[in-house]
Amino acid sequence: MLEVPAGHPEKPQGEDGFKLLERMNGGSHEELGLWGISFLPIADTDRVLDVGCGGGANIKRLLARVPRGHVTGVDYSAVSVQASSDHNAEAVEAGRCDVLEGNASALPFPDSSFDIVTAFETTYYWDLPVALREVARVLKPGGHFLVCNEDDGGDPEILDLSTRIPGMVIHTPDALRDALVEANFTIESIERIPEKGHLAIVAQPK
């Protein structure tokens, strides 16, 4: 198995990892995050989980949508946990946010813990069937799950690049939809910006 480098987005490590996360908190990722969140029916008291929280920018965006709620981030990179905690230090101090180290395939939360679960730019690295079942498990009845990816598998150059990145699989919209249905989700909406390759899927557990 190829070793994942420190600056690799799957599991940022060390100083290179911190630099990568700082870059990912802005630029096109900011636009993508705001676009994806716009499709979620979020109440201001919701409890939200961001899986693969990276540098914590989407946690901050979600906190703005739940002023009387709570946002939890989880990531299996210790560097990401630190970066997300630092980026949202005020909310962490106020008890409105916490960030934990954990894996999408074994989420460290009880059943039916969250109203909303989000996954931005992270399903590329998931054991998809296992992780989707975990998301369904931690969602409350009637909860919503957002998958938001910058790349939808339609660009041959990006597909070729992904084959050279350890552990990365770019799932097409059809593949993600089918995986969600297989994991016992109902698809609510599939949104796309084809010219950019952006994809957002909102689903509910049955």
Image (spheres, rainbow, N blue to C red):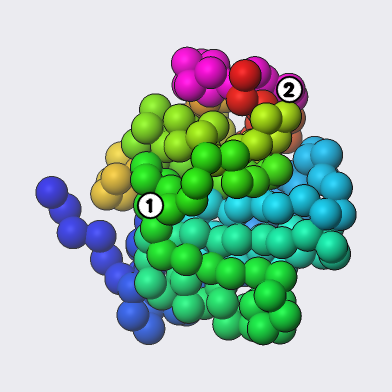
Residue 87: x and y in percent read 63, 78
Q: Marks 1 and 2: CB-CB under 8 Å?
A: no
How many C-alpha atoms fall within 10 Å of the one at disc 2: few (<14), some, or many (≥20)?
Answer: few
> Relative to residue 184, is residue 44 drawn left or right?
right
Q: Which secondary structure, mark 2?
A: strand
Q: Is residue 147 visible?
A: no
Total labels drawn: 2
Membership of 4 in magenta stretch: no
Residue at image coords 27%, 49%: 166
Looking at the picture, tell me which residue is in the foreground, 27 or 145: 145
Task: Report which quarter residue 136 is drawn in.
Answer: top right
Residue at image coords 82%, 45%: 42
Answer with mark 1 or mark 2, whichever residue precedes in sequence: 1
**Magenta span:** 178-189
Q: Which secondary structure, mark 1?
A: loop
Residue 145: x and y in percent read 64, 36
Q: Is residue 182 visible?
A: yes
- Look at the picture and state if 76 lies above or below 85: above
How many C-alpha atoms fall within 10 Å of the one at disc 1: few (<14), some, or many (≥20)?
Answer: some
Residue at image coords 43%, 48%: 107
- Look at the picture and state if 144 lies above or below 81: above
> Relative to residue 36, is residue 64 drawn left or right?
right
Task: Report which quarter residue 199 is drawn in.
Answer: top right
Q: Amino acid at mark 2?
A: Glu
Residue 176: x and y in percent read 52, 25
Residue at image coords 71%, 61%: 70
- Look at the picture and state if 66 lies above or below 128: below
Q: Amino acid at mark 1?
A: Asn
Please give the residue where the numbered disc 1 appears in the rendered image: 103
CA gap between label 1 and label 2 equals 26 Å
Residue 188 bears which disc, if any? 2
Residue 143 bears which disc, if any? none
